[in-house]
Image (tube, rainbow, N blue to C red):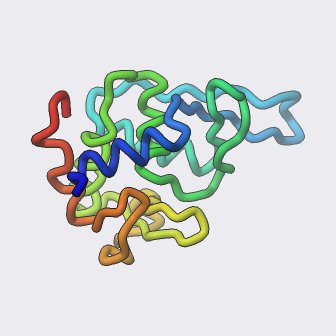
Amino acid sequence: MATNEEKVLAYVDKNNNGPLHFMSVRNSTADKAVKMDLPKVRTTEKYIVEVMKLARKNNSVFNESKTIETYYGRMRSAIDIWRHIKDIKPKETIFKVMRTMYKMAQEQKIGGQYCGGVRRRVFLSADLYKTVYNTTQLDEFGLYFAYWENIGLEAKNA
């Protein structure tokens, strides 16, 4: 039977896992969309906060194909958030992002739910959503949300 870490890595391997960046939404005053860079901050938690802020008004674009993966104003999954952070911090691990998101949820700094439409646990900042719902629903990794608390701590380079 696969460990929790192996389940996460298997999911990451079979899905787009290259870096994402934000692209502004075109409006009547802009000729074309503009890439929005994440500001450089010191902690994973602050990166997560910045991703959630930028997600409100900007589309998530896959760096390689330049295609929009998620439109502005939508909730973002752990893998989406990690891929945005990877754009400027390539060595960041999915495990650290997941642990940090779990901690932030316990402190009511983020909220979310399992979305059956995209089949992922998705999140917003706490000013919009303070609770994580459906925590007993298995997520995209085949895990319960509580398992995120210590994910990767025994894995090398977590």
Locate residue 121 relative to residue 132 in the image: left or right: right
Quarter of the image where the C terminus is located: top left
Q: Position of residue 153 (x, y in %)?
A: 13, 42
The residue positioned 52% from the left and 64% from the top of the image is: 119
The residue positioned 70% from the left and 36% from the top of the image is: 24
Question: Which residue is more in the foreground, 108 or 152?
Answer: 152
Question: Which residue is more in the foreground, 136 or 24?
Answer: 136
Q: Quadrant of residue 121?
A: bottom left
Q: Quadrant of residue 81?
A: top left
The residue lying furthest to the left in this view is: 154
Locate residue 67 relative to residue 111 in the image: left or right: right
Quarter of the image where the N terminus is located: bottom left
Locate residue 157 relative to residue 109 in the image: left or right: left
The residue positioned 64% from the left and 48% from the top of the image is: 70
The residue positioned 28% from the left and 27% from the top of the image is: 42
Q: Position of residue 19 (x, y in %)?
A: 52, 29
The residue lying furthest to the front in this view is: 1
Q: Position of residue 86 (x, y in %)?
A: 43, 28
How many numbered discs sit on the rendered protein? Answer: 0
